[in-house]
Amino acid sequence: MAALPPPPFAIPPPLPLGWTEHVGPNGQPYYYNAQTQQSTYVRPLPAFPMIPQAVAPPAAVPAQKKAKKEKPLVKTPIPGTPWLRVITTEGNTFYTHTGEKRSVWTVPEDIKDAVEQLEREEALKKAEEAKRAEEERVKEVERIQSEVREMVGKRKAAEGPVPMDEVVVTKKAKVDDEEDGEDEDEDEDDEEEEEEEEEWQREAAAQLAAEAEEEKKRREEEEKRLEEEAKRLKEAEKQKGAPQLNMPSRVDLSIDEAKALFKTLLREKNINPLHPWDTSLPLFVSDPRYVLLPSVSARREAFDEYCRDRARELRQSKVKVEKETLDPKQEFDRLLKDEVKSTRTSWTEWRRQWKKDRRFYGWGRDDREREKRFRDYLKELGEQKRAAAKKAEAAFFALLKESGLANPGAIWVEIKKHLTSDPRYDAVGSSSLREELFNTYVKAGASDVTAQPSSGDPPSQAQPSPKPEEDEEERERRLKERKERAVKEREEKVKAQRTKLEADIDRSKLSLNKEEGELEFRTMLTDAIRDPQVTWDTVQPQLQKDPRFVNSPLPLNQQLHIFHSHVNALRGKHLANLHALFASHAPALSTPFTALPVASLVSSLPVTKLGYSVDQLEREFEKWQRERTHEARLAFDQMLTENAFVEFWGRLGKIGGKGVDESIKYDDIGDDNEEDQVDMKVLAKSVDMKEIIKVLKNDKRYLVFDHVSEQREQWLREYLSQLSAPTLSVHVPEK
């Protein structure tokens, strides 16, 4: 497909140096370069200014049969960064990261300043080298001129001095003495030599003057070039951060025009629209039109647009070719022939399967026309199948007749073994149909046999044979009845399976819906009911406005159970808060209800939510105090059980007398004397109630009953009285 021409410029860009425009015989302009002897129909663009780089001057490379692979030529480290600037054998420049082992064609943003500094240093270094070379050349010219002057002086010295007075005298003598022939000849020779010497000096002076003039022009050109380079460097410093390649100011291109030229470049290079940017970039990065767009993002955007447009063009051209070469009607009929094999095929299913195929939607004004053709094809297919079935049945009857095995009384299982190799046997697709056709053929043959007259009967007594048309109608009727019966059985079976499947699905949904419904019902109660005093009857009108209540799958008894549990939870929460208020105002068990700030408690949130009056609040406080006292009493008993001092001496006090011999060995004092004994009962009696109280008085569980000290002491005595005597080892002394 031919590339689209670039959009016309209002003012075409100027031609580069050395290019001229001409008009061919057919009126089409072309461009010619006299230096390179190159001609082209594409208008060349002017050279764009680039920051000077250490790139070797292009040299004429002889054409090769096979292009060499592009390789790195010059690697320059960028100071202060892990990057390298690499110049290839083709003159292209890219940047590579030594640590990450990755390369890019454009200058990365993080090293742009370092690259510009490196290029400025290289440009200054190049200018200094050029200046130094110029100075050396000037010195060489001066040296050559001095050598020429020395040679002229040596030649004059070798010829000898010619004094002016002698010349004058000689000329005067020549005038005075014209008769002397020899003197006149000598004077003429001297004059000729002097004229030759003057001529040589004039030629040398003219040559030196021409060289000096040429050297002056070349020096002026070099100075002008250095000034332009310095000016370019200053502009590059001012425009820091600008891309390396910039559009010259004299070529005024808009973004759309530059994008059109960039797309023309991609078309000329025949870039594959299916290849990514990184793969296609080396194919066109060295073209001057690459830098017409100001940034990499703009180039990538233009590249993506080109890929989309080019892919669309290729696809449309392919579709156009297919449309031109193929008939849509024939393609639709071929699709029907290839994919519709049964007369039971549904149009809806077949359309859903093939609606995105070009052979399907390429023909017909709408789906109604396609459906009509589909129905007609089903009729044609049914007629073809019926004709084929009749033909197969006729061939099967012919097979039975040719075999001669289908006699009355023959068994099909035995007969079919001899017929399976014949293709007319397989032409009848159903085994049951083959057996039915065999039975029909046998019955028809038996009727013919019974209908034939015996050898002694007259011909007039012969019975007529059954008509084949009646047999055909009977067979079709039986086939129709059997098909209807099979369809009815199949429908009943499918209906039963569907009913069972729907019941299973309903049960699964019911269990799932029950769990989800319970969760939604609890969430609804949490959102709607926050008062523990409400009842089911009072709150039901409010809940009926909520769709979660109306659509709830839960039965009524379960809803009531969840409701009461929610209300009890709310009541328990507020009771816990009320008990916390009681504990803050009544830290002791002896605090009466009258000592509480009743007015403050009545107006508190827990009492308000619970709806308690002062009497109800007092009853709740007394109930809480009873529960609290009961818990403190249990804690008191637990304290006595845990205290080892109370248990030891309480049990020791239960010892009667002195054991068996009214004496107990006292081993705990560490005395080895077996005669030392102590009366433990007397020792236990020395530990009275005061000693036990002294041990228990620091326990919080003991102090909580300070308001009933007598009762507390009674509890302590009851506990000690319930203790049993310890089991002690008794030592009986030897007699």
Image: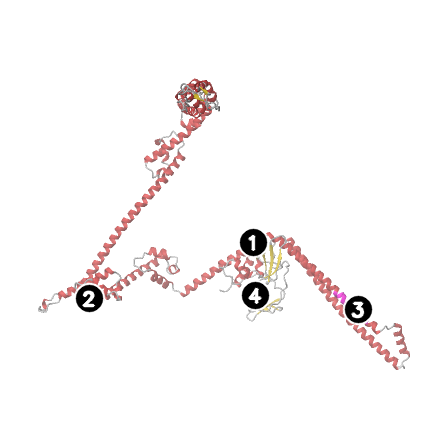
Question: What is the magenta range?
Answer: 140-154
Sooner in the amino-acid sequence: mark 1 or mark 3: 1
Structural distance between the alpha carbons of marks 2 and 1: 89 Å
Question: Height in image: 7 above or below 596?
Answer: below
Is there a contact, CB below 8 Å, between mark 4 and mark 3? no
Sooner in the amino-acid sequence: mark 3 or mark 2: 3
Q: Amino acid at mark 4?
A: Lys
From the top left corner, tell me how far across and down residue 289 is, in percent: 57, 60
Q: Secondary structure at mark 2?
A: loop
Residue 68 numbered mark, or none? 4
Sooner in the amino-acid sequence: mark 4 or mark 2: 4
Give the residue at mark 3: 149
Is there a contact, CB below 8 Å, between mark 4 and mark 2? no
Sooner in the amino-acid sequence: mark 1 or mark 4: 4
Question: Height in image: 559 above or below 429?
Answer: above
Image quadrant assignment for residue 379: bottom left
Give the residue at mark 1: 100
Sooner in the amino-acid sequence: mark 4 or mark 3: 4
Structural distance between the alpha carbons of marks 3 and 2: 139 Å
Q: Mark 1 or mark 3: which is in front? A: 1
From the top left corner, tell me how far across and down residue 375 is, in percent: 31, 59
Question: Height in image: 191 above or below 567?
Answer: below
Is there a contact, CB below 8 Å, between mark 1 and mark 4? no
Is there a contact, CB below 8 Å, between mark 3 and mark 2? no
Q: Amino acid at mark 1?
A: Glu
From the top left corner, tell me how far across and down residue 135 is, in percent: 73, 62
**Label 3 neighbour load within 10 Å: few <14, some 14-19, many 20+:** some
Sooner in the amino-acid sequence: mark 2 or mark 1: 1
Q: Amino acid at mark 3?
A: Arg
